[in-house]
């Protein structure tokens, strides 16, 4: 038996794996970690009671339960690869966070930008997801 067989496999924790240049906000880091882990209930728990997710090609999904159900149906197998971001304070003690990166599915990869608004409690009130692709690339994705 070699050393690899005698030691149970361990996975690095998600926090060790995920770093987003310019972003240290725990809510935002958790959003990407939980989505990548397929823990959609944990992802939806990051949203305020009236928080809204604005996915591409869809109407707003409002509230944690609806967001969890949407993610369960639409986000299976997605790998979010946030690269860099910027956070800034806005009115009413809210924070706006913009993150750029890529989403990889089994069928395609596409550049994406995420725009989050966090309330005073650091809950997500708005998450807007925008695909950064040409119209032709978007047509190819929808097929």
Image (cartoon, rainbow, N blue to C red):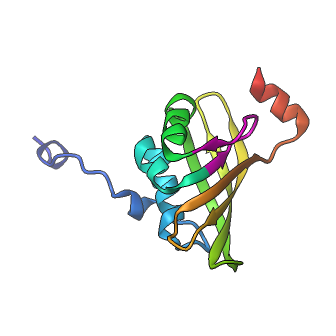
Q: Nearer the viewer, residue 3 or 91?
A: 91
Horizontally, residue 140 falls left or right of residue 119, namely right
Q: Is residue 56 magenta?
A: yes
Q: Nearer the viewer, residue 2 or 22?
A: 22
Whether residue 39 is visible to the viewer of this picture, yes or no, is no
Q: Is residue 137 magenta?
A: no
Horizontally, residue 64 falls left or right of residue 95, namely left
Quadrant of image for the N terminus: top left
Q: Examine the rendered structure and indicate whether residue 74 appears above or below residue 133.
A: above
Horizontally, residue 111 falls left or right of residue 36, namely right
Give the residue displayed 23% in from the left and 46% down from the top. 9
Give the residue displayed 80% in from the left and 48% down from the top. 132
Instruction: Give, as a single range, the part of the protein colored magenta.
Output: 52-62
Quadrant of image for the C terminus: top right
Whether residue 64 is visible to the viewer of this picture, yes or no, is yes
Give the residue displayed 72% in from the left and 37% down from the top. 59
Percent across and percent down for residue 41 are 41, 44
Percent across and percent down for residue 103 are 63, 44
């Amino acid at each position: 038996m070699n050393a690899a067989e005698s030691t149970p496999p361990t996975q690095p924790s998600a926090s060790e794996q995920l770093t987003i240049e310019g972003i240290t906000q725990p809510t935002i880091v958790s959003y990407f970690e939980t989505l990548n882990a397929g823990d959609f209930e944990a992802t939806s728990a990051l949203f305020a009671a009236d928080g809204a997710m604005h996915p591409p090609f869809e109407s707003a999904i409002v509230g944690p339960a609806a967001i969890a159900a949407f993610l369960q149906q639409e986000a299976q197998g997605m790998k979010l690869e946030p690269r860099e971001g910027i956070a800034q304070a806005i009115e009413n003690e809210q924070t706006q966070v913009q993150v750029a990166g890529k989403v990889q599915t089994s069928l395609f990869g596409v550049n994406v930008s995420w725009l989050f608004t966090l309330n005073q409690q650091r809950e997500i009130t708005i998450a807007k997801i925008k695909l950064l692709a040409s119209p032709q690339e978007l047509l190819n994705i929808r097929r």
